[in-house]
Every structure is written in structure tokens, then in C-alpha cells.
Amino acid sequence: MKQPHKKRIQVAVSILSEATKKLDELDRSKLVDYLRRTYEKTGLSPIRGKALPPDIYDKELTTLYVIGKYGLGLLDDYPAMFSKIFYIEERLEEALNLLLQGKVDEARERIKSVSPSGVIDGNMIARLLRIPLTKLVLGFMSEDDFTRILHVVFKAFPEEEKTVRSYVRFFIGFKLAEAIYRGEIRSREYKEALKRALAIRVGFPKTTPGDDYVKAIAEAVFNIPEEELSKVLRIPAKQEGPGGVGEQEPGEDIAPD
């Protein structure tokens, strides 16, 4: 069976290995730059939806954090690396644990402490959810635990309902793209059935991505060619517009930036 995240894990291990040798020289911004250059060299894309925000590689440090902490056990041997470089991810994971204990006010303070604006906005909630999503994708968290976190965050931050639903769409879109990559989806009918099953399993039955969103993830993250995607996704033909050839306007799906 295809292993969709094998290369991502191998690259992360390589980057972390180099980081442990150069801790005195590194800070967060330098590691972000090294991550970006390494991804570009190896043809990897950050875990993302449709959008490619300017801070996407800073957010992708979550992958290194998760693999370093849960895969390699580096926190015990290199605690300074985590406090110096992965301090955002550490604070956000602390916030998640507090939320799971019902300590919402304390969790809010943790999030604010690493928010550039000092407030909790959609961007910070998206960063918060990126940690359990990455743990799930890389095999360090069960779907049940991820689902529980989604609902805890949904309840704790009702003002960010749109952001949480956006992340639900992203999760479902990502899992569909992953299943296409593995060869598990062979028809549009099965794709639709799996999409609805995933939405029901996570408790957001009406929050599902459109095919254009799934296509964007499949192409960006899994490098699946359009010819293969067209067998299971409804891909509209490119249309001629007044300014030349254009594509269909994106739907209502929102990328978890």
C-alpha cells in the first residue's frame, strides 16, 4: 500500500537531525527558512488547503514539532530546542490540554501569549487545530480524539464557528485526497459516500468540502495529476473569459490558513 506521508516524515527527520547539531545558530525564523528551502528542493508542499498564506512554512513547523516530540522523543534530550524554536506549538498544545480539562479561561491566556496581535482570532484557532490534525495525519492521534478536540474547541470558541467548520472541511478534504492517493477511491459514488461518512463521524454532517477543494489538496499535497482526479472528482472544464482562459470561481470552502 502506498505510504502518503513517508517522504514528509523522512524529510522532517533529516531537518531535525541537522537542527540538533546547530542549536546555537538556529532560531525559529532560520529553521522556517531551512524548512522552506528543503521542501522546495525535495518537491514537498506544506500540509494545506487551497490557500498558500505567507506564513505557511512557519505553520508547517508543526510537522517538525509533532515528529520531534512524538516520533523521535527529542523533547527529553533537547528541551532547549523546543523552548527556543517550538514555543508557539508548545503553548498551543498546553492550551489544548487545558481545554480538554475544561479550563477555558486558562487556555485562552495560553493562546493569547503567542498571538502576534495579543487576541484570539481565526488564525490562532487554525494554528491550534493544526496540532491535533498533524498528529492524526502522521499517526500519533486517533480520529476519535481528534473529533473530541474539534467539539471542545467549537464549544469553547463559539465566535470562531466559521474557522472550526473550515477546519472540518479541510480534514475531510485531506482524508479524501489521501484516500485517492492510496487508490482506495475508485468512483465518484464511493467518494461521496466516504465524504458523508467522514462528516457524520466527526459530528458535522453538513460541513463538507466541494470537489474543487479536494482537488486543490490532492494536487498541492499529494501531487496527484488532474487526469487521475477527474475519474473520481467533478472537475469543471476551463472556460474562456474576457481576459483569456480562466477557471471556475472557487466555492465557499475556506482553506485553514
Image: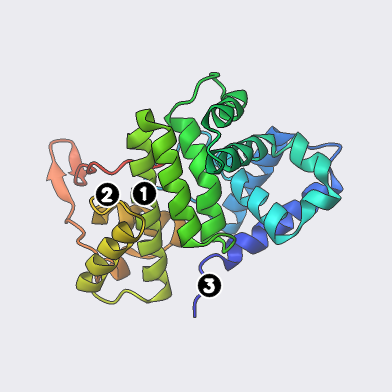
Viewer-nearest of discs 2 and 3: 2
**Which residue is at a point 30% across and 57% down the rendered structure image?**
199
Q: Residues within 10 Å of mark 1 (few under 14, many from 20)?
A: many
* Residue type for callout 2: Thr
- Mark-to-mark CA distance, 3 and 1: 23 Å
**Which residue is at a point 60% across and 46% down the rendered structure image?**
62
Which residue bears the numbered disc 3?
Answer: 3
Which residue bears the numbered disc 2?
Answer: 207
Left or right, residue 63 beside residue 199: right
* Residue type for callout 1: Val
* Residue type for callout 3: Gln
Depth order, front residue of 183/170 = 170
Q: Secondary structure at mark 3?
A: loop
In primary-sequence order, the first of circles 2 and 3 is 3
Residue 112: image location, x then y, percent: 57, 24
The label number, if any, that marks residue 168 in the structure image? 1
- Tag 2–tag 1 contact (CB < 8 Å): yes
Q: Secondary structure at mark 2?
A: loop
Residue 224: image location, x then y, percent: 39, 65
Q: Is residue 46 visible?
A: no
Viewer-nearest of discs 3 and 1: 1
Left or right, residue 197 beside residue 16: left
